[in-house]
Structures are given as C-alpha cells and as structure tokens.
Amino acid sequence: MKNEYAMLLDQLTSLRKLRRKILDEINTNLKDINSSEFYVLNKICEKSGEQTMSDLSDSTGLSNALITASVDSLENLKLVKRKRGPDRRSYVVKLTAKGMEKCREMEKLKNRSIESLFRNMTKEDLTELKETLKKLNELMDKYM
C-alpha cells in the first residue's frame, strides 16, 4: 500500500496532467501561438497587461531564455511590445490592442475548456476542489 506522501505526489501529477490537457485544448484552438507563448501571454494578461521579463520568469517558472524567445515571438505577432524598464537593465512587456483582444479570446477558450472538464462534478465537489487548490496555492506562496 502506498504511503500518504506517495499518494499525494500521484495526485499532484494528476493536476499537472489536467493542466496539460487544458493547455493542449486551448493550443489546438489558438494555432498561432505555442504553449510557452500562451503561458507567457496569459501571465501578462493577468497582471494588468504589463510585466517585467524577470517577473514573467518568476511567475511562470520558465527560463529567461524561454521567456525571451516567447516574448520575441509574441512581439513579432504584434501581441506585446517590449520597452526599457525604469533601471535601464530591465525590460517591461506590455500588451498591445491586438494582445488585449487575444487575451479575451484566450479567456473564453480557457473557460470553455475548464467547464467541459468539470461539468460532471457537483457544485459541492467543485467548491471543495477550489478550496483545496486555494490552500495549496497559499502553501506554495508561503514556502516557495
């Protein structure tokens, strides 16, 4: 019989698989951006349309090189614009009007994808899941 921590690790792996499934479904519908670009753009959308490159790396867990490549691609698609930060060593990435439109499109796709995955759960189960994930996020913020 598996011990409690091994079971917990298995469940966390299931969360990663669930996230991957949602991202894959979104990527299938977006076609013009890949999963890294989606993830980076999504983080910029969440942060009022502007974020530093280093904050993007911290919030996504992606390497600086992958952030730079993703922002380069998003900039080529005219979804974001990069500008010098206040200290001249950093850059700030800001959404363009086209980027804001893409954010709205992505939000609809995310909601539709998530809804399709969880539509068979009861309201009570969903509430419990949300509370558990909220606690997990709070723990991660506290200890990571």
Image (cartoon, rainbow, N blue to C red):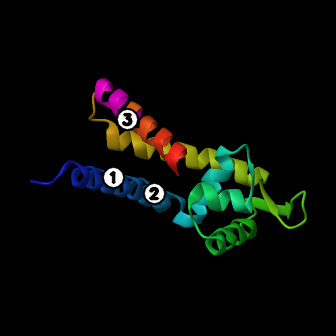
Closer to the N terminus: mark 2 or mark 3? 2
The number of numbered discs placed on residues in the rendered structure image is: 3
Q: Residues within 10 Å of mark 2 (few under 14, many from 20)?
A: many
Asked which secondary structure carries label 2, the reply is: helix
Residue 24 image-quadrant placement? bottom left
Q: Is residue 131 visible?
A: yes
Q: Which residue is mark 2?
A: 23
Residue occupying the point 50% across, 39% down: 138
Q: Are marks 2 and 3 in contact (CB under 8 Å)?
A: no
Magenta region: which residues?
A: 123-130
Residue occupying the point 90% across, 60% down: 87
Label 1 vs label 2, nearer the camera: 1
Q: Which residue is mark 3?
A: 132
Amino acid identity at mark 2: Leu
Residue occupying the point 56% across, 61% down: 61
Instruction: Give the side of residue 28 with respect to residue 62, left or right.
Output: left
Amino acid identity at mark 3: Thr
Query: Which label was assigned to residue 12?
Result: 1
Q: Nearer the viewer, residue 24 or 10?
A: 10
Amino acid identity at mark 1: Leu
CA gap between label 1 and label 2 equals 17 Å
Q: Position of residue 65 (x, y in %)?
A: 65, 75
Q: Position of residue 7 (x, y in %)?
A: 22, 51
Closer to the N terminus: mark 1 or mark 3? 1
Asked which secondary structure carries label 3, the reply is: helix
